[in-house]
Amino acid sequence: MGQKPGELRKPSSRKYRCLLTIVYAKYFRSVGRTLLATTYCGREQSRSQRRKKRWKWIGHTLRKAPNCVTRQALTWNPQGQRKRGRPKNTLRREMEIYMRKMNKNWMELEKKAQDRVGWRMLVGGLCSIWSNRRK
């Protein structure tokens, strides 16, 4: 049977793992290096700045089309066991932890991401609140 336009195929786990790794890692490493070279003069970024960059990227991804692979990879739940030496928490699990702290769910975040100004305010508020809690 042929595939209709707009119909989603069941993707392979390898494809998702590779794409999410490539997109996510390349985005943060390139931005991180330029920020370190220009702004911080060799100092490491703080946790709040890394968290803010991550949430900005998540907002960018949530604004994409629903059939985009990077957007599907955010909510993707891989089956099986992780390899030895890999972290237990995935990006999806970390996001769900933060969403529980904010009392939000995926649908609310998707709606908020469509409003760019509202998303920026949400991200700015979250990062400043979390950085103040640790002190």
Image (cartoon, rainbow, N blue to C red):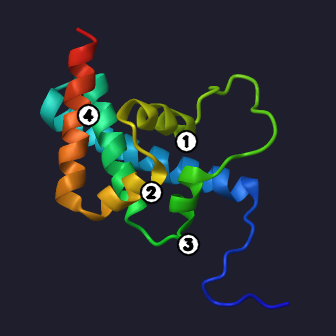
Residue drawn at x 39%, y 37% is 103
Q: Earlier in the sequence, mark 2 or mark 3?
A: 3
Choose mark 1 or mark 2, whichever is in front.
2
Q: According to the image, label 3 marks what residue?
A: 67
Amino acid type of the residue tagged 4 in the rendering: Leu
The label number, if any, that marks residue 92 in the structure image = 1
Q: Residue furthest front?
A: 103
Element under disc 4: helix
Q: Earlier in the sequence, mark 2 or mark 4?
A: 2
Q: Earlier in the sequence, mark 4 or mark 3?
A: 3
Quadrant of the rendering where the C terminus is positioned = top left
3D distance between C-alphas at marks 2 and 3: 16 Å
Amino acid type of the residue tagged 3 in the rendering: Asn
Element under disc 2: helix
Element under disc 1: helix
Choose mark 2 or mark 4, whichever is in front.
2
Q: Residues within 10 Å of mark 3 (few under 14, many from 20)?
A: few
3D distance between C-alphas at marks 2 and 4: 18 Å
Q: According to the image, label 2 marks what residue?
A: 107
Amino acid type of the residue tagged 1 in the rendering: Arg
3D distance between C-alphas at marks 4 and 3: 28 Å
Residue drawn at x 45%, y 57% is 107
Element under disc 3: loop
Q: Earlier in the sequence, mark 1 or mark 3?
A: 3
The label number, if any, that marks residue 126 in the structure image = 4
